[in-house]
Image (cartoon, grey):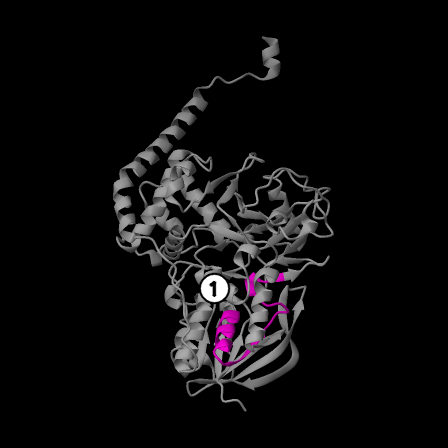
Amino acid sequence: MSDRPQVTVAGGGLAGMTAAMRLAERGYQVKLYEQKSMLGGNLASRPAGHGTKLDVYPHMFLSWYQNFWQLLQDSGVDRDQAFTPFSSVKQLARGDYPRFTGLTNGYSPRYVIQNLFSGVGPPADMFVFWYATIDLLAERLNPTMLLDDVSVTGFMQARPYMTERAAKACDNFITMVWAIPSYLASAEDYRTYLAYSVANYTPPAMLAKGPAADRVIDPLTRAMKHAGVEIHREVQLASVSCTNGRVTEIGLQDATFDPHTYTWVRTANAWTEPVDELVLAVPPVVLSDLVRSGEPGHRIVEAVPKLAELSRLRSQRIPILHAYFKRKLRPIPPEPVGLYDSRLALAFTDISQAWTDMAELADTTVLSVSASDPYALPGTGADDDAFAILSELAQYVEFDPGDTWGKSPDIDWTRTRYESNTDSQLFINETGIDVWRPEAACTGVANLYFAGNFCANRIGMMTVESAVASGLEAARAVVERRGFGAPVEILEPKAIFDALCVWLRYVWAPYAVAAKGWSMGSDWLRELRRHLAPTKPPNDQRRDS
């Protein structure tokens, strides 16, 4: 038997894959178990028929994702060949199609004036939107409130210079990037995200040139196997047994997909395995159940009562509609698009343009549409929910949605797919939860570690980079405890100068207040003109006169 330390990793998402690869590279014997048939978690791609794969979620990859890009480089991925840079994000209002507005290099100070007059909103409101970014960044060095205890919306509404349109622009941006509304997003996590983004905006973001499975997950899987990771798919961790402050045994079961509940469920085939070191890289809801699993006296939560608070961490499904059209729609930008004031909080990416290496998409438009407010869907069945998304999309983009699901003459129904994503939920960076996010090393259980973007890590906001960073944190904790293998390096993204933000906060504060006054005055004048405008009589009255 080998004297190398053995590590079991439960969860084949990006965090688990990162931990497994880095530990295997350092000589550990690593087994990775994944419940689903595909690796990657929320960065995975599902088989969609016709030889294609469709991403669970469309993702933007930002320049400051240093640990993510290093992981891909070590997996043999050439970023310039596999990803397309873009410098703007777009917005579309009802009735404006095909006139898209957008912010160009939105994190760059060089483009402030251009973005003020971009058409995303009136210049006065755009100035307020820009100033709010500076104001929030200044909070690190010159705090005026506890950001951990307030949402982005709460921060915005508390500022005396804020306007309704500027707050809506912020909400639209956050919904497009993280697929959660700003009234849920933690202001502190958003501040951290902005600090990294403003300091690293060349290019602002990138899109993969094909499905994430091809560009990210498959190369990483090959690298893991080359490093010696033993991968088991369609196997679910069912229980964890803890004795005398150590995890001693795990229960495993084969898993299969249930299309009726849209979940992966256990089969009757079950077994147990002893463990040496255990990394749990599973979603927070699953983790909350696992710490309570096992026989009385052998449950993790009995050894670490604080872990009962994991139930405070929430996730939310974000349904995705992959709409294949029978033709090319009138100009759709290649960048991600947020639909302004959408009831379902819709955003889309035209993957027929993003996936440049897929020639079969050249003559059609394929929109991956996310609905970030699933609670606004009818909830009376998958077809009804999918049609609600399609119908609201038709209020922004010109096409015939038909009367019911499956009836639109403009849609290729053989390829169009709706995914409820019940089995792939996104962690919500809510206010006040940082105290409940678990550390990489579990205090109280010597050989237990946690990974996932919901864990405490230096990135904060739910991003691809935070998933990678949490996997590295878990791998580092294992190496430090065992004293075996080279130290695990975690790269720290650059952040902007806090002192500059504080200076700008006070220098530009009077102008922000003036911009709000300008915005309110403009609204008042428009309303006055509307009331003073002569009312035209109906046509029949004009003829009688």
83 falls in the magenta region: no
* Image coordinates for residue 53, horizontal then vertical, percent: 66, 59
The residue lying toward the viewer, choosing from 274 and 23, is 23
* Image coordinates for residue 451, horizontal then vertical, percent: 47, 70
* Image coordinates for residue 473, horizontal then vertical, percent: 42, 71
**The C terminus, quarter of image:** top right
> Is residue 326 something that shows in the picture?
yes
Label 1, on which residue?
70
The residue lying toward the viewer, choosing from 460 and 494, is 494
The amino acid pointed to by label 1 is: Gln
Question: What range of the chain is rendered magenta?
Answer: 16-45
Q: Total marks drawn?
A: 1
Q: Is residue 387 left or right of residue 21?
A: right
Q: Residue at x 32, y 40 (%)?
A: 161
> Is residue 314 something that shows in the picture?
no
Q: Residue at x 30, y 36 (%)?
A: 511
* Image coordinates for residue 391, horizontal then vertical, percent: 63, 43
The correct choice, above or below, for 107 with respect to 81 in the image is above
The residue lying toward the viewer, choosing from 342 and 38, is 38
Q: Residues within 10 Å of mark 1 (few under 14, many from 20)?
A: few
The correct choice, above or below, for 506 with respect to 52 in the image is above
Q: Secondary structure at mark 1?
A: helix
The correct choice, above or below, for 319 with respect to 453 in the image is above
Q: Residue at x 28, y 44 (%)?
A: 504
Q: Is residue 125 left or right of residue 79?
A: left
Q: Residue at x 42, y 55 (%)?
A: 185
39 falls in the magenta region: yes
